Amino acid sequence: VIVGAGSPAQVPALIDDLSQGRDATLPLRVQYARAADRHELHFSPRDLMGEMLRPVQRPRFVAIVASSELATALMANPVAPDGFVVEGHVAGGHNAPPRGPLALDSDGQPQYGPADEVDCTQMVKLGKPFWLAGSYGKPGGLQRALRRGAAGIQVGTAFALCQESGIADPLKRAILQRVADGQTSVRTDPRASPTTFPFKVFQFPESLSDAAVYRGRKRTCDAGMLRTPFKTESGGVGYRCPAESETLFAKKGGRPQNTVGRMCLCNGLLATIGLGAVRPGGYREPPLITLGAHVSDLRAFLPAGRTSYTAADVIARLEAPLTSTSFSTPLARSC
Ligand SMILES: Cc1cc2nc3c(=O)[nH]c(=O)nc-3n(C[C@H](O)[C@H](O)[C@H](O)COP(=O)(O)O)c2cc1C
């Protein structure tokens, strides 16, 4: 079980309970609720499985962290993680925000600095295996991670565009064409994600990264996977998402400025894997593509005459001994 999402402090105890078939409880933060009000999510394996319920071997738990401090804090919990994925801010998907007050560069991207580099010597001291993530999926990346004391690496971007990945084929082909043409741009968007975490957005004309496509989409929240609970005036629990209709969000007591620039990750990411909703009238939900900062490195897989590559090609390139031909792109040279 590999979980990040802020601090996964509760997860090891959940895994203990569920693997033993015990009822599990997860405390929920409900906005505006009084401290005395307890909100919890209950799950009873026995209610679901009845007599069929058997304990299972406890799966190991690997926490995704962006700092050795968080890893150290998690180790102090009664049930500590069995290992860590240490993810840097160049990785695809969500990124941890920079340490300290948020400063943006001239393009509105969060500015990361030396304080955001993870101290691997501290990770080694924790005595648990860890895997480094964030632009390690290129020649030399694995060796670099091993030298720093890691057990290995976690790779996302290189696999996201291989033949086996779930990204819809026509979209994948178009993205790879851009990679081959050397025309890639990835923005760390501090506003896009309703979670408020920075999110890597690949800039692509027919996707939500395009201002006209973004404006042309009617904001709607019908998948609801990133909604947050809040206490309603009548004392119940409501759900809202800052990427939903601004009017609805405001009606639910949300602050209008919280909606600015938010993207519907649910509908956008579903569209990216070819499961986008088609609205009455034929409007197709546009994709939202997330890839890591070093996507341009994938050009190495696309020499003249090749338009695709496989997961095995990625593995082979990661395992290949370093030679001068491994460094066929300027970015690869930087590792
Ligand atoms: C398309 C894509 C989707 C991802 N989705 C998630 C996710 O849902 N949860 C998560 O913890 N990490 C996610 N990641 C991050 C990867 O698990 C991985 O840590 C990261 O991609 C490694 O850096 P790299 O992209 O430079 O290889 C995603 C990455 C990509 C490229």
Image (spheres, grey):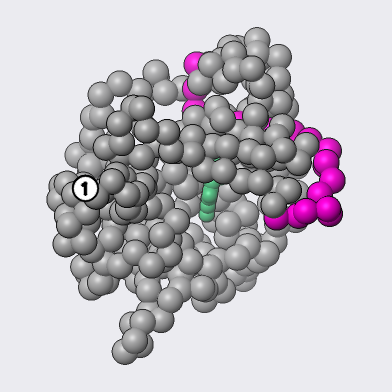
Identify the residue shown where x is 65% and y is 29%.
13
Residue sitting nearer the eye, 304 or 247: 247
Q: Position of residue 254 (x, y in %)?
A: 20, 49
From this view, report whether residue 187 is shown above or below residue 82.
below
Identify the residue shown where x is 21% and y is 61%.
248
Farthest residue toward the front? 234
Q: Is residue 5 left or right of residue 16?
A: left
Dividing the picture into quadrants, the one containing residue 221 is bottom left
Magenta span of residues: 48-69
Q: Is residue 230 left or right of residue 299?
A: left
Dividing the picture into quadrants, the one containing residue 246 is bottom left
Identify the residue shown where x is 76% and y is 54%.
49
Q: Is mark 1 within 8 Å of ligand 1?
A: no
Q: Is residue 163 left or right of residue 261?
A: right
Q: Position of residue 101 (x, y in %)?
A: 25, 24
Q: Position of residue 291 (x, y in %)?
A: 47, 52
Q: Which residue is mark 1?
A: 233
Q: Position of residue 39 (x, y in %)?
A: 43, 38
- Give the quadrant of the N terminus: top right
From this view, report whether residue 136 is shown above or below residue 292.
above
From this view, report whether residue 130 is shown above or below residue 22.
above
Amino acid at the residue labelled 1: Glu
One can see residue 185 in this view = no
Q: Secondary structure at mark 1?
A: loop
